Amino acid sequence: MTQTSARTFVPGSLRGELAVPGDKSISHRALMLAAHGTSPVRITNLNPGRDVRATLEALLALGAVCATDGGDIVVSGGRLRESPAPLDCMNSGSTARMMLGLCAGANIRARFDGDDSLRKRPMEPVAAQLRAFGAKIRTTDGRMPVEFLGTPEIQTTHFILVSASAQIKSALLLAGLYAATPIVISGDRASRDHTERLLQYFGADISWDGKTIALKSTALTPRDIDVAGDASAAAFFITAATITPESAIVIRNAGVNPTRTGLIDGLLAMGAAIEFRNTRTVSGEPVADIAVRHAELHATTIGGELAVRAIDEIPLLAVAAAFAQGSTKMTGIGDLRTKESDRIAAIERLLAAVGIAMETLPNGIVVRGGAPQATGRVLETEHDHRTAMAAAVLACAAGPITIDRADSIDVSFPAFIPTLQSVQRP
């Protein structure tokens, strides 16, 4: 359901059970790996958002064979080829950066573009690494549009990550996979490892320890994929139930990959009441039912490896910190300045909307906990889906909050509003 006008979120406890859509990060990677071979791969619970649709349509433009079967997607791969039109990555940085790696490995010339927001985000870091691989890439002042001109000869196969970026790491792994070239990547800091897990699930000889990844063999045996529930989508409900009195929920079939549980670990450090039940492995990923109830919170410090694992959920940790006793310090989050919007500025607007002070540090923030109370101001989201949904979380415990528009939610979680309404008790 697309909402293009202002939307008001109301307070109320969360009670009952719910499910979240398939993980967006896993969905991108599942499509790209499935397109590598010619044997059909059935993908169940693919994320329904616009970002994943951008990846699906880019693969179709390159000649991949994809068909809908009930609620599943069946990818048969095929002989990939150059697209006569630019690949429209819409608002998806994952699509742009990882598909660039795929094209570099497959040696398929391609042009990449996206919406106004994506055109502002940096592409040079991934382009520089792929140039070392041997790819010829032209960016526009380091950003989109990007033109890939081919990989005449493979050069470097041992890479050092300048920053812990799962997208750059995955682009390099895809380049190695599609070029049938073993590679080694060092300098990781426990960034999300969905690509590594899927490669292993498909039978690749790959090892990783949170610091170094070695793809030793690119021979794959495609298997059907059941995508785990999105950890980032679950995070909104976990946070809302934690901060809102009289809340008690269970989120079914949610991904609990350790590289994605930074939010949960941060909340537990604040005193949250969160429990994993029925933990199991599905298509190479750890999955569980997550039980959450309201808890009184206290301040903590978040940084280092925890900040890396929680980077997309830092706005939610800031929302939780607003309800915690004391001042919560978060460092190592400078990358939030270059997401779909400046999310550090977005956090400041979120907290100001409920009367909570925040101090900005060179590479972090300090949130002064208190008694958040909605001020009645309309919150500008800058068309960022995570800011819009974080406002809904904040409203659950702090009072009615109106956002300028809600259509950005469709990027990752089109059913967010009805899902929230199904468990909220105003």
Image (cartoon, rainbow, N blue to C red):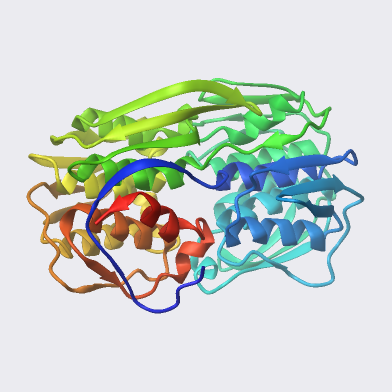
Comparing 294 with 218, the one in front is 294
Residue 112 figure quarter: bottom right
Percent position of residue 375, x then y: 12, 68
Using the image, determine if residue 81 lies above or below residue 311.
below
Residue 308 figure quarter: top left
Percent position of residue 380, x then y: 30, 72
Q: Is 154 placed left or right of 23 in the picture?
A: right
Comparing 103 with 160, the one in front is 103
Percent position of residue 104, x then y: 76, 50
Q: Is residue 339 visible?
A: no
Q: Is 369 placed left or right of 59 in the picture?
A: left
Q: Is residue 86 visible?
A: yes
Q: Which residue is at 51% across, 63% downward?
A: 410
Q: Is 383 placed left or right of 203 in the picture?
A: left
Q: Which residue is at 19% across, 41% downward?
A: 246
Quarter occupied by the C terminus: bottom left
How many marks are shown on the rendered structure? 0
Q: Which residue is at 66% across, 24% downward?
A: 214
Using the image, determine if residue 362 lies above or below residue 374.
above
Comparing 1 with 110, the one in front is 1
Comparing 191 with 228, the one in front is 228
Percent position of residue 223, x then y: 78, 31
Farthest residue to the bottom: give it: 5
Q: Which residue is at 79% across, 72% downward?
A: 85
